[in-house]
Image (cartoon, rainbow, N blue to C red):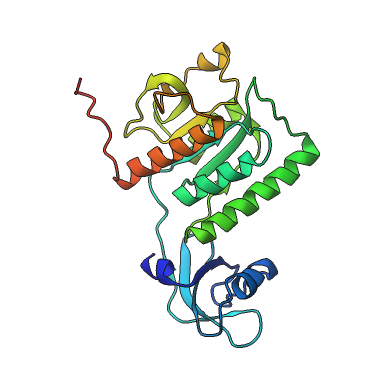
Amino acid sequence: MTAARSAAAHVFVVDLDRPEPDDDDWYHLQRVLRLRPGESVTAADGRGRWRVCRMAAEAQRLEPDAPVVEEPHPSPLVAVGFAPVKGDRPEWTVQKLTELGVDLIVPFTAARSVVRWDAERREHHLRRLRRVAREAAMQARRAWLPEVAELTDLAGATRGMRTAGANGPDAVALAEPGGGPLTDASRAVLVGPEGGWTPEELGSGLPTVGLSATILRAETAAVAVGTLLCALREGRVAPRDRRST
């Protein structure tokens, strides 16, 4: 998306034939970024289609300035699950995972989770997390919006990742100090809460992967996982040769 990176801004719209940003996005373009008529803005539908537009002289709309481009979905899938912690750290985590290029973000409740959202707070937090992901995807100039899944438990998070495409015996793993390295088979990693995994969770049959020689905070571990998985997919780092010692 070279054109998207060089444009003054990037927004998501419902209809690329009539690209009309919503009220919040239009306010951001006009009042925060202070864009003027004629400036280049890219519009995307969140499903891989986007086009270059121009700020219109009148009304809350963009004027198409180039044909629609279809961007293939990144492959293979990259997914990160995390147990929400206190404060605004879940929003920060989703923001950074989106910027990195993670496709599927799964909040889940583990046995030692301190934060437990009831039904009312769950809907509020999910709406907020999805809004944060959308805003971060605009900043990152993504053609595909990431999916922020419903809050679930460890088993549900694992099933959701496998259904989305994290297949194979080593595709889904638990982040755990002392675990093995991420490999080219790694697709999805689950990061536990502040108190770590219980022995029962570690005995669930999922492999474990280590992220650092130090103990990371939960939100730091989630971002470290997203960084490594996306770097592996994009060929920015090479997986360790399994034959090496």
Q: Quadrant of residue 82?
A: top right
The residue furthest right is 120
Q: Residue furthest left?
A: 244
Relative vertical location of residue 124 with respect to residue 29 in this rendering, above or below: above
Residue 167 at x, y percent in the picture: 42, 33
- On screen, residue 1 above or below 100: below
Expressed as whole percent of the image width and height from the top left, the position of residue 12 reads 57, 65
The quarter of the displayed image where residue 66 is located: bottom left
* Camera sees residue 165: no
- Residue visible at 53% across and 61% down? 138
Which residue sits at x=55%, y=41%?
A: 105
Q: How many marks?
A: 0
Look at 62% across and 39% down and name the residue there: 89
* Residue 231 appears left or right of 83: left
Residue 160: where, in percent of width, then height? 55, 35
Q: Which of the image's four quarters has the N terminus? A: bottom left
Q: Quadrant of the C terminus?
A: top left
Quadrant for residue 115, please give it: top right
Percent x, y of residue 168: 39, 30
**9 or 108, which is in the foreground?**
9
**Residue 141 higher or lower than 180, as above or below:** below
Between 173 and 25, the one nearer to me in the picture = 25
Farthest residue to the bottom: give it.
Answer: 57
Identity of the residue drawn at 36% across and 30% down? 182
Q: Is residue 194 visible?
A: yes
Q: Is residue 111 left or right of residue 176?
A: right
